[in-house]
Image (tube, grey):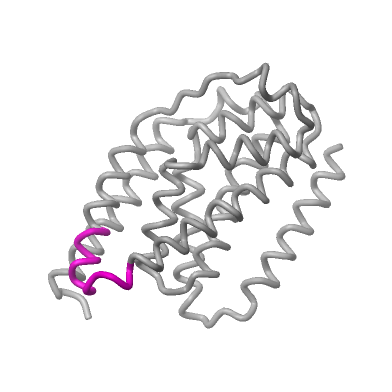
Amino acid sequence: MIRAATGWIVACVMVLANLIRPLEPVMFEALFVSTGIVTLAEIGDKTQLLAFILAARFLKPVPIIWGILVATVLNHALAAAVGNHVANYFSETTLLWLLAASFLAVAAWTLIPDKMDDGGSLLSQYGPFVASLVAFFVAEMGDKTQVATVMLAAQYPWYLAVVAGTTLGMLLANVPVVLVSNFAAARLPLTLIRSLAALCFLLLALYAAIRALGWLA
């Protein structure tokens, strides 16, 4: 089981590598920032708790991971499209102030621990892939990682880099959870990780505000 899951992860990384290969060097900032922000923000998030539930219930990591991947790509592709679209309706200065306020709000939101009800009766009706796909897609609606994807796409004009980065961040945070299930749950310093994620969002807010004030070219 672990060998199959490991092979799947390698294949997934290769696919992502092929997707980002055409990117110009400057686009890698959007990719790395998106990956890091979403990875940290996802630790302790309700979708990570959902990954625990799915892994414990089905004991089939590969279809669960596939479901997470498909749901994340669909959800974040839509979120990034909204972010790119919204960016066209505001001046650069206005957009930067909106981003600063949004990143600041998400920084505070990140410090609040997520809780999730165990939708046992619903999940048990479906196989692991369908249950994971539907559950993750719905759980991401209005979630802070989806909001972060909208903001990142509004800040960076490179749609593919943002979607690839946020998707990779979701996989980095959730795939290990699926593979080890509850083994590492109690060992993660969630308060520290949430604080680091909030700090990253705060720094992005400050960066946007400084750019809006014209202190950076």
Q: Is residue 12 magenta?
A: no
Quadrant in the picture for residue 168: bottom right
Residue 12 x %, y %: 73, 57
Q: Is residue 145 above or below residue 214?
A: above
The N terminus - image quarter: top right
Q: Is residue 63 above or below residue 120?
A: below
Along the line of sight, which residue is nearer the eye, 74 or 51?
Answer: 74
Total numbered labels placed on residues in the image: 0
Looking at the image, residue 52 sits to the left or right of residue 147; the answer is right
Q: Is residue 113 above or below residue 203?
A: above
Q: Is residue 55 above or below residue 172?
A: above
Along the line of sight, which residue is nearer the eye, 58 or 134?
Answer: 134
Quadrant in the picture for residue 185: top right
User: Which residue is found at the position 45% from the left and 31% from the top?
Assistant: 190
User: Which residue is found at the position 70% from the left and 43% from the top?
Assistant: 67
User: Which residue is found at the position 86% from the left and 44% from the top?
Assistant: 3
User: Which residue is found at the position 22% from the left and 81% from the top?
Assistant: 217
Along the line of sight, which residue is nearer the eye, 168 or 95?
Answer: 95
Q: Which residues are magenta?
A: 87-99
Quadrant in the picture for residue 135: top right
Q: Is residue 93 magenta?
A: yes
Looking at the image, residue 132 sits to the left or right of residue 42; the answer is right
Residue 164 x %, y %: 58, 63
Magenta stretch: dominant secondary structure: helix
Residue 152 x %, y %: 40, 61
Looking at the image, residue 164 sits to the left or right of residue 12; the answer is left
Residue 62 x %, y %: 79, 42
